[in-house]
Image (spheres, rainbow, N blue to C red):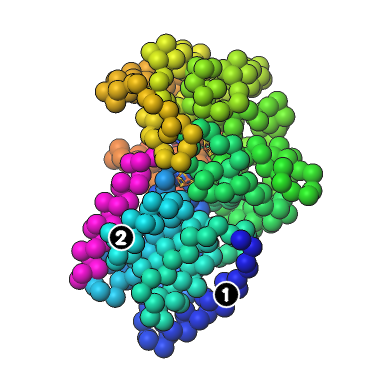
Amino acid sequence: MNQEINVNEYISAVSDILVKRNTKPRACVRSFGCQLNFSDGEKIKGMLVKMGCEMAEKEENADIVIYNTCAVRENAEDRVFGNLGFLKHYKEKNPEMIIGLCGCMASLEHVTRKLKNSYRFVDIVFSPSALDRLPKLLLEKLSGSRYAFDTNEYNMSSEGLYQERDSSFKASVPIMFGCNNFCTYCIVPYVRGRERSRKPENIIQEVEKLVQNGYKEIMLLGQNVNSYGKDLAESVDFPELLQRINEIDGDFVVRFMSSHPKDAGKKLIDTIINCGKIGKHLHLPVQSGSNDILDKMNRRYTVEKYLETIDYARSFIPDFSFTTDIIVGFPNESEEDFEKTLSLMKRVKYDNIYSFIYSKRSGTKAAEIEDMVSDEEKGKRMTRLLSLQREISTESYKRFIGRTMRVLVDGKSKTEGYMTGKSNEFVIVEFEGDKSLVGSFVNVKITDAKNWAVTGVII
Ligand code: SAH
Ligand code: SF4
Ligand code: F3S
């Protein structure tokens, strides 16, 4: 659907009602899932603030609660339904409470059906591409409607939406929305629609403004950033966009997520290596070390092709930092397939991995496969994989001992008196320091390595 609406008109209409009622509702927005969803959450907060709401940290103190959900795995869905159960109790105490659900779950028919049948206290529902409909739906609700649902798929442009950012020095900047890849296990293409790239000039302008406002880390986001630009009239690809961002004046680090290995080629690596502001790290989700499983996942690369990219980067920077995503227990993954994943991990020596047990998503192609591997076996494989990664991380982090790393300070560490931050290579660094350093770059000489971080002293 391509029906434009005037968001600002609805924002003023809601804020007029609130002013007349002499109320400043407290709103709590909770986002789940990936960074793109958190970025949407910032836009939802932005609209709520513009409508005259005050933000609340906790649901129990709020008059409006919005759950911005993720559907990538079943446990993400279960968690949201569990949380909704709690909200019901809060709503019994505060019957005026408005409860909204949006994000990827809102695109799933079985979810909206369940909400209508069994979670009737949920007032507002909108799909990710109906994000800018929130003010309109709130207006309907405040004007007396029992429900305000809009789960259509729109051709929305989120350009110009005000964003209430979670951090004052780290900013997420979506460069594209949706996914065309249809990996057989994945729900994202079904809930986020086809790929839509933002215009390069809009992205550049946003980054320039952020840097002028003191932002030190710019995280470019997309489900597959390497497809960036393919749908634009203008000829521009992701490495070119990176180069243009690298030319922006200021002291900041550029990161991006996620890269699909089928499209991450030499041009991308050359750009990372040649552009001073781009972090020397690549998150390259491999999913499995078995070509047979990769084929069944419709990933469209082989382990050999994947390793070419790794080796190419390491021909310039021998210990170039890689992280990855791995799915354990894709339907009928054999012991041999799994061992190939372990071998790949040993070969690449990832600094960190994000591993998930396969979760069946109805509607996807893999959900139709009859799976002969037990949950118990999958659990055991996950334990083996995590234990191997702990060994690899400890070993590989040792390479930083003695080096000086430039670190963007995030905040206090769990260790008393210590601060934590991320190095240019996206490695967690801990060091003695105080709160005044948050949001600035410091140089840390590394003295020790753990299995999840390195530690050192500021110089
Ligand atoms: N677009 C990104 C990933 C988005 S989802 C990419 O292609 O890299 C983040 C991760 O969740 C995926 O990389 C995958 O490892 C995991 N994931 C996706 N669907 C899953 C499923 N059905 N079960 C388990 N893990 C899944
Ligand atoms: Fe899902 Fe694959 Fe698209 Fe990533 S590339 S979002 S895993 S379909
Ligand atoms: Fe989850 Fe949607 Fe992101 S399904 S991982 S929140 S795109």
Residue 132 location (% of width, % of height):
54, 65
Q: Which residue is mark 1?
A: 8
Q: Earlier in the sequence, mark 2 or mark 1?
A: 1
Q: Which residue is mark 2?
A: 117
Amino acid type, residue under disc 1 in the picture: Asn
Q: Residue at x 64, y 49 (%)?
A: 196
Of 422 and 404, the residue lying toward us? 422
> Residue 171: within the magenta?
no
Q: Residue at x 63, y 18 (%)?
A: 305
Residue 98 location (% of width, % of height):
34, 70
Residue 450 location (% of width, % of height):
37, 24
Q: Describe residue 431's horizontal placement relative to residue 424 as left or right.
A: left
Q: Describe residue 36's horizontal placement relative to residue 24 as left or right.
A: right
Q: Residue at x 43, y 28 (%)?
A: 369
Q: Bounds of the magenta span?
A: 73-93
Total tally of numbered discs in the picture? 2
Q: Residue at x 51, y 27 (%)?
A: 297
Most common secondary structure along the magenta stretch = helix
* Res 262 visible: yes
SS for dot 1: helix
